[in-house]
């Protein structure tokens, strides 16, 4: 019976050795997996650092661009304000022209008869002057013909 005890102790020892061997293989594979995971994590950390730097640079450029757009927008606002003021000035000018036109029209209507008489008198004076000039030319011709 003692042999049985030795055999069972031997079987237990062999089972323990097999268990230890498989445990060692598993731990070695696990160690390799952890090394790969560690190297992947390091590579990922480097990539994240690069992405972070690029993101910061992009953010700075975006802020600079936003500032530039704001300055240009402010400049354009000045132009639009000037255009509005110009439009207001043109509106006031048009209103003044309408008032002057209305006043001239009213004055013309009031003085239409006087203007008509003045035009008739002017035409009469012009006709008289033309006849006077013609008469003078005729007299000048006659006096030159008599001299010849």
Image (cartoon, rainbow, N blue to C red):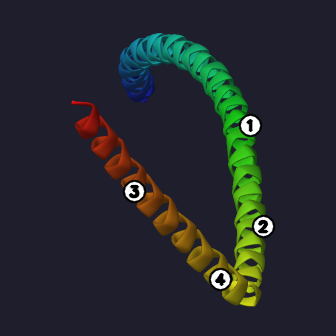
Eyeballing the image, is 131 above or below 133? below
Proximity of marks 1 and 3: CB atoms separated by less than 8 Å = no
Most foreground residue, 35 or 45: 45
| Measured Cα–Cα span from mark 3 to mark 2 | 51 Å
Q: Earlier in the sequence, mark 3 or mark 2?
A: 2
Q: Earlier in the sequence, mark 4 or mark 1?
A: 1
Residue 103 in percent (x, y) is at: 78, 78
Residue displayed at 77% across by 51% down: 85
Which mark's residue is nearer the viewer, 1 or 3?
Answer: 3
Which quadrant of the view contains residue 107?
Answer: bottom right
Near mark 4 (Cα within 10 A), the count class, few <14, some 14-19 or many ≥20, is few
Residue identified by numbered label 4: 117
Q: Please give the label number shown on residue 96.
A: 2
Near mark 2 (Cα within 10 A), the count class, few <14, some 14-19 or many ≥20, is few
In the displayed structure image, the side of residue 59 where residue 36 appears, left or right = left
Proximity of marks 3 and 4: CB atoms separated by less than 8 Å = no
Eyeballing the image, is 84 above or below 54? below
Assign a secondary structure to mark 3: helix
How many tags in the picture?
4
Q: Earlier in the sequence, mark 3 or mark 4?
A: 4
| Measured Cα–Cα span from mark 1 to mark 3 | 78 Å
Residue identified by numbered label 3: 135
| Measured Cα–Cα span from mark 4 to mark 1 | 63 Å
């Amino acid at each position: 019976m003692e042999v049985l005890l030795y055999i069972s102790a031997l079987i237990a020892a062999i089972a323990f050795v097999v268990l230890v061997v498989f445990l060692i293989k598993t731990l070695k594979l696990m160690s390799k997996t952890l090394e790969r995971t560690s190297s992947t994590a390091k590579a990922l950390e480097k990539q994240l650092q690069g992405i972070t730097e690029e993101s910061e640079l992009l953010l700075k450029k975006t802020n600079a661009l936003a500032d530039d757009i704001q300055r240009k927008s402010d400049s354009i606002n000045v132009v639009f304000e000037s255009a509005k003021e110009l439009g207001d000035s043109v509106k006031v000018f048009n209103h003044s022209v309408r008032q002057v036109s209305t006043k001239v029209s009213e004055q013309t209507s009031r003085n239409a008869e006087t203007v008509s008489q003045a035009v008739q008198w002017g035409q009469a004076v012009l006709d008289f002057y033309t006849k006077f000039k013609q008469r003078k030319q005729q007299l000048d011709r006659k006096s030159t013909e008599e001299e010849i």
